[in-house]
Image (cartoon, rainbow, N blue to C red):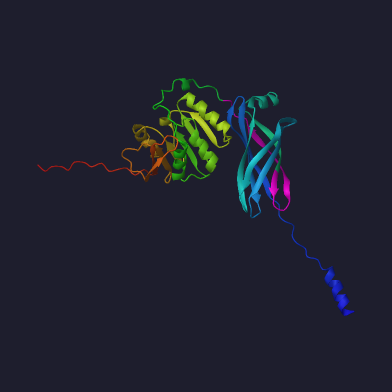
């Protein structure tokens, strides 16, 4: 009898395990980038906490934005983003919208205005214990509607390009970015961006923000097309500007494919870079400045040997020997 009683009570015991955790997310802010009349990039900046020891894929985003009683944006977007294991990350999820149509739906609101909005999002994540789950998110704040850039008269007055455009072979582009040890936390400026292949590669391969500058409107057109085709508009900006008028101090990485004399002309601007910033040049040195590294690479595109020069700020200026004075 004693044995039966013990067995009965043992069978009644249950083990209470804590339920597996679920990821959490919150909306940090929403903003527009790369605004043009028929297109703009709307960025949903989210903070996502992945509690699992494996990556957390994000698969879909449903969104609905209202201002008062007026729904001005809604839709769904497939995602190809994953959150690193056991980490909390801030991610920017880009949505391409027709900017003019969106403004028209706001009934009388003009670009340059700030409007109150309510965002209702549903983020779908593929979790290990539950499979696909939906995370509902809401936020109320104000949204700046950027003005649509107008063609600037001064653009027509820009001088002609200093160099003829010759594209950098992709293998050389890869080596330039590898040599500078680009990370997703860097801001890269490409001075004379050509068709945009360096900034696009930096965004695709390393996830960093990049700005391409060129003075030639044809190169700007090609770069913008490359950015759009590669779906990196949330990371890459293209601007038509004279590179010798730029403030470079915000950049961590500068990429160049210019003539040696133009590299030298940039030295006063490069001197203002933060310590530790990297400058990399395809084929051409910078007279009077000692590089940290010079490598050679033969491209399979043209079967030609190319050089890649690396400098780190502050620049290491070479000492100029002065003639010794001759005693009288």
Q: Say if residue 142 shows up in the picture.
A: yes
Quadrant where the image shows the N terminus: bottom right
- Please name whichever residue, 325 or 135, is drawn nearer the observer in this view of the structure: 135
Give the quadrant of residue 167. top left
Image height check: is 326 above or below 42? below
Instruction: Give the left or right position of residue 71, taking residue 276 as reference.
Output: right
Residue sticking out furthest to the bottom:
2
Q: Say if residue 249 shows up in the picture.
A: no
Image height check: is 287 above or below 108? below
Give the quadrant of residue 68. top right
Image height check: is 1 above or below 273? below
The picture places residue 264, in percent across and down from the top left corner, at 34, 35
* The magenta stretch spans residue 138: yes
Residue depicted at x 67% and y 27%: 102
Residue sticking out furthest to the right:
1
What stretch of residues is rendered in magenta? 124-148
- Please name whichever residue, 211 or 221, is drawn nearer the observer in this view of the structure: 221
The picture places residue 108, in percent across and down from the top left corner, at 68, 23
Total numbered badges shown on the rendered structure: 0
Residue depicted at x 87% and y 72%: 8
The picture places residue 6, in percent across and down from the top left corner, at 85, 75
- Please name whichever residue, 321 or 11, is drawn nearer the observer in this view of the structure: 11
The prevailing secondary structure element of the residues shown in magenta is strand
The picture places residue 13, in percent across and down from the top left corner, at 82, 68
Instruction: Give the left or right position of residue 12, taking residue 90 as reference.
Output: right
Give the quadrant of residue 44. top right
Residue depicted at x 70% and y 26%: 105
* The magenta stretch spans residue 68: no
Quadrant where the image shows the C terminus: top left
């Amino acid at each position: 009898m004693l044995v039966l009683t013990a067995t009965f009570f043992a069978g009644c015991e249950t083990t209470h395990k804590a339920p597996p955790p679920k990821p959490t997310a919150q909306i940090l802010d929403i903003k527009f980038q790369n605004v043009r009349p028929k297109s703009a990039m709307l960025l949903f900046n989210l903070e996502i906490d992945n509690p699992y020891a494996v990556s957390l894929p994000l698969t879909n985003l449903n969104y609905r934005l209202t201002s008062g009683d007026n729904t001005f944006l809604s839709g769904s977007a497939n995602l190809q983003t994953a959150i690193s294991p056991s980490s909390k990350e801030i991610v920017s999820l880009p949505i391409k919208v027709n900017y003019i149509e969106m403004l028209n739906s706001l009934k009388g609101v003009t670009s340059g205005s700030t409007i109150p909005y309510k965002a209702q999002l549903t983020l779908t994540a593929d979790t290990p214990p539950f499979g696909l789950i939906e995370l509902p998110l809401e936020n109320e704040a104000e949204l700046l509607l950027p003005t649509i850039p107008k063609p600037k008269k001064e653009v027509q007055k820009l001088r002609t390009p200093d160099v003829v455009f010759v594209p950098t072979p992709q293998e050389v582009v890869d080596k330039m970015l590898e040599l500078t040890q680009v990370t997703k936390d860097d801001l890269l400026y490409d001075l004379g961006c050509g068709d945009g292949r360096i900034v696009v590669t930096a965004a695709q391969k390393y996830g960093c923000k990049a700005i391409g500058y060129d003075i030639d409107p044809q190169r700007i057109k090609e770069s913008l097309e490359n950015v759009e085709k590669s779906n990196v508009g949330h990371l890459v900006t293209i601007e038509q500007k004279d590179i010798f008028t730029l403030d470079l101090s915000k950049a961590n990485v500068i990429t160049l494919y210019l003539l040696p004399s133009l590299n030298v002309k940039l030295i006063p601007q490069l001197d203002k870079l933060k310590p530790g910033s990297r400058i990399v040049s395809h084929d051409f040195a910078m007279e009077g400045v000692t590089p940290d590294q010079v490598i050679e690479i033969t491209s399979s595109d043209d079967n030609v040997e190319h050089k890649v020069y690396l400098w780190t700020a502050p620049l290491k200026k070479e000492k100029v020997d002065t003639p010794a004075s001759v005693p009288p």
